[in-house]
Image: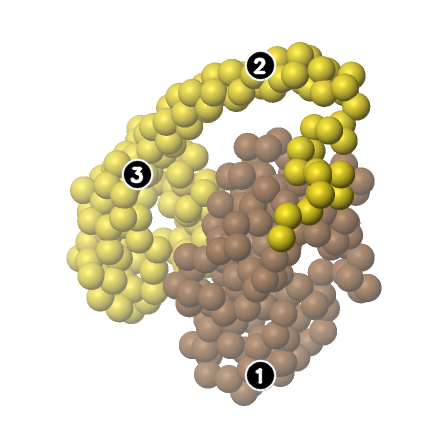
Amino acid sequence: MKLPANEAPSLDYRAKVPHKARRNYLTSDRSKHLTLLKSASIATSVLAVVLSSESLAQEADGERLFRQRCSSCHSLEAGQNRTGPSLAGVNGRAAGSVEDARYSPALRDSDVVWNSETLDRFLANPRQFVPGTTMSISVTNEAQRRALAEFLTASGRGTP
Amino acid sequence: MPTLTVNGNAVDTNADPQTPLLWVLREHLGLTGTKFGCGVGSCGACTIHLDGEATFACQVPLEAAVGHKITTIEGLSPNGDHPLQRAWIAEQTPQCGYCQSGQIMRAAALLAANPKPSREDIIDGMAPNLCRCGTYPRIARAIERAAQEG
């Protein structure tokens, strides 16, 4: 059945929009919209550059990684033991040897001496490197792990 | 029998000295605001304060907590009106909520050490706590609000 033309509902939404408003949309709003699109795409590329340089910086920034991943349990102040021992002067230290720190018997009895290589292996999988240790955080990203090991053994931290 | 100081109260427990503090809090003392997430100190759901420092309760054996001041989410403020708790409500921060008590405890330790943290301080300081709903932007906003409104 076909409705008479004058009773058919209008499907043209533009008919309901006053002519002036329509013109405004087509001119000012549309050009604003285009400018917005352009700046959004510029912002996206800027953001991409910022993000990639940030992740690179983060991978290389052992100090920041230490703050983010380690400092809940470890301090860099000598004598300040938390859940884990202070890591001040960790380079060249025998594992399990910090006074008044809490250690698993496994770590205390191990022959490990900390340096950038042993720290790197420990951080890759602590419970594989020293079975029975209560240290459970592993850093699976190799670049991050290396940055952390380098940070922890860097000059100035090697001497208590 | 080890005596703990939890939220200002001295409590006795007959748990094994090697029991992770998390389970002493939850199972022996009924303080279930502190959550179990991963059990290996990787997610932060169990974050509490040990002498004011944010600590993974799953990583601290009972014997290591004796003699220290333990604060859980239940004891952060007397009426749930810590500036962070108010900011959390104002910003409608939680989604599923599971990680949020740990997030608030981490944030409270952060603000205690650094009352006016920058965005980067917040991001670094909160890094140990994960949120699978992805409420990070609202968490950061709530911390900024709490820092501002005190």
Pointer 2 indicates a residue of which chain?
A
Say what amino acid the circle numbered 2 marks.
Answer: Thr
Residue A55, image quadrant: top left
Secondary structure at numbered mark 2: helix
Subunit bearing disc 1: B
| Chain under numbered label 3 | A
Question: Which chain is tinted brown?
Answer: B
Amino acid carrying label 1: it is His
Dot 1: element: helix
Q: Position of residue A114 (x, y in %)?
A: 24, 46
**Colour used to depict chain A in the structure image:** yellow
Residue A35's disc is 2
| Mark pair 3, 2: CA separation | 40 Å
Local secondary structure at mark 3: helix
The verdict on a common chain for dots 1 and 2 is no
Mark 3, residue position? A144
| Left or right, B79 with reference to A43 | right
Whether residue B68 is visible = no
Tell me, yes or no, whether the two marked residues, 3 and 2, touch with CB atoms within 8 Å: no
User: Residue B92: image x %, image y %?
Assistant: 70, 52
Mark 3 or 2, closer to the camera: 2
Residue B52 vs B114, above or below: the answer is below
- Residue in the image at 32% along x and 43% along y: A90
Q: Which residue is mark 1?
A: B28
Residue in the picture at 63% in, 70% down: B33
**Is residue A154 visible in this depiction of the protein?**
yes
Q: Quadrant of residue B28?
A: bottom right
Disc 3 residue type? Gln
Instruction: Please give the name of the residue rendered at 53% of the width and 55% of the height, measured from the top-left corner.
Output: B133
